[in-house]
Amino acid sequence: MKKLLLVVLAAIGGLLVYRQIQADRAEQDLWTEATDSVPSGSSV
């Protein structure tokens, strides 16, 4: 029973770490897009 509990806790911990990494990556992509310089040759 203890081993099963440890496996469940490890899985939950892994999921939380994975979600935090995804959130950090999304925030970094947003900052990159927001601070990316616009090419001067574009005529829109």
Image (cartoon, rainbow, N blue to C red):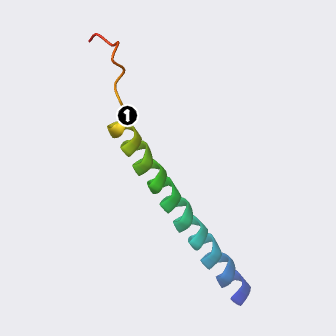
Residue at 60% across, 67% down? 14
Closest to the observer, 27 or 16:
27
Q: Which residue is mark 1?
A: 36
Percent position (x, y) of residue 7?
68, 77
Is 6 above or below relative to 38?
below
Closest to the observer, 40 or 30:
40
> Looking at this rendering, what residue extends furthest in the top direction?
43
Percent position (x, y) of residue 35?
34, 39
Residue at 57% across, 72% down? 12
> Looking at this rendering, what residue extends furthest in the bottom direction?
2
Label 1 secondary element? loop
Label 1, residues with CA under 10 Å away: few <14, some 14-19, many ≥20: few
Mark 1 residue type = Asp
Quarter of the figure with residue 9: bottom right
Taking 3 as reference, is 43 left or right?
A: left
Residue at 36% across, 20% down? 39
Taking 33 as reference, is 43 left or right?
A: left
Taking 4 as reference, is 20 left or right?
A: left
Q: Which quadrant is the N terminus positioned in?
A: bottom right
Percent position (x, y) of residue 22?
50, 53
Residue at 48% across, 62% down? 20
Is 32 above or below relative to 5?
above
Q: Which quadrant is the C terminus positioned in?
A: top left
Percent position (x, y) of residue 6?
67, 82
